[in-house]
Image (cartoon, coloured by chain):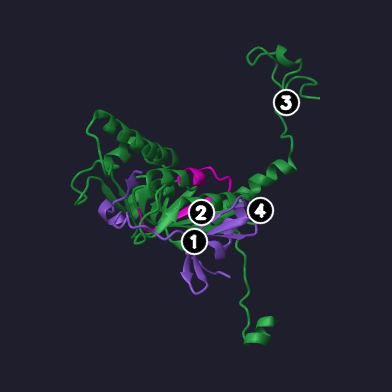
Chain colours: A green, B purple
Amino acid sequence: MESIEALGTTEAPVNKSNIHVLTIIGQIEGHLTLPPQNKTTRYEHIIPQLVAAELNPEIEGILAILNTVGGDVEAGLALAEMMASLSKPTVSLVLGGGHSIGVPIAVAADHSFIAHTATMTIHPIRLSGLVIGVPQTYEYLDKMQDRVVKFVVANSRISEAKYRELMFRTGELARDIGTVLVGKDAVKVGLIDDVGGLAEAVAKVQELIGHWRASRQRPKNRPNPPKPPGPPGGGQASETSGPHPTSSPGGGPR
Amino acid sequence: MILYTPVPSEVVLDGFFVQAPTPVEVRVGEAILLVEDLGGGWGRVVRLISGNPYDYLKPDWMPGMMIRLS
């Protein structure tokens, strides 16, 4: 009413969604602020946002939209772990690209989608800056790589051997070793669940929200699920020697 | 810091040692906003510091948003 009187305009009705949209874009920024030519996603903002999404009763599902070139390993894995540990349904959609540390974030969701033309680059971790040429350096790198590989394998259908094979493949990337997966290739290797776009992703979140609501209501309606009737006399009867519960007279719990 | 990205590190880190302007702290209720002063009474949100997770859902407090400094 105020805006009609003051400005001669009407306000568009605001519909509150039960889905929280999380956009993971550009570089995943770590503990050091990156120079301003980078578009960045900052973990210090996304992590509490996910906490809020978990706590807010109005938010029932999370849709993560990714167009990222990767970034800091620690920060990327932190976001991925947060996503994976949410109790509310999560769906990810890779648009454009979900490279390097973007891969664990994409697979952390309950269900993942990739657009037909989107790409995911899988390649080994490199060390930049001063590198000491000792065996421990390589062991450390290997350990960091293992963290990523193990998370991806635990949260997708891809096997560890296949993921490592894609990671160390030669002849596909011009400046690096590794693989670029385009759209359905990521689904074929078991990294991503489906090829799809926004409509499919939103429909999937709503479907998962339906299951989630049902699973939350179940314990309220049936606080004590009925136990199968046991043999009379408690622990005296064994599985092989005791009378069959249905055939025993007066059997079952009282 | 281990950068895991197909973008060359010389591109990502170009200008890394250029000193960024120190943001000013603005207290709004229980929350603190770190704001880059743009002059003319306007600032750009750099970071939000708050113990209330719901503050991180406020669109006006997202990093990059312009706010009026008074």
Residue occupying the point 52% across, 49% down? A47
Please provide the residue range marked out in magenta: A80-98
Dot 3 alpha-carbon crowd within 10 angstroms: few under 14, some 14 to 19, many 20 or more: few
Dot 4 alpha-carbon crowd within 10 angstroms: few under 14, some 14 to 19, many 20 or more: few
Indicate the quadrant where residue A116 lies: bottom left
The tag earlier along the polypeptide, 4 or 3, is 4
Q: Circle 3 is placed at which residue position?
A: A229
3D distance between C-alphas at marks 2 and 4: 20 Å
The tag earlier along the polypeptide, 2 or 4, is 2
Q: Circle 2 is placed at which residue position?
A: A45
Name the one closer to the observer, A43 or A104: A43
Q: Circle 4 is placed at which residue position?
A: A57
Residue occupying the point 25% across, 45% down? A178
Q: Nearest to the eye among marks 4 and 3: give it.
A: 4
Residue A56 x %, y %: 64, 53
Dot 1 alpha-carbon crowd within 10 angstroms: few under 14, some 14 to 19, many 20 or more: some
3D distance between C-alphas at marks 1 and 2: 8 Å
Q: Is residue A21 left or right of residue A120?
A: right
Classify mark 2: helix, strand or loop.
helix
- Magenta run includes residue A135: no
Residue B41 appears in the rendering: yes
Q: Amino acid at mark 1?
A: Pro
Q: Amino acid at mark 2?
A: His
Subunit under mark 2: A
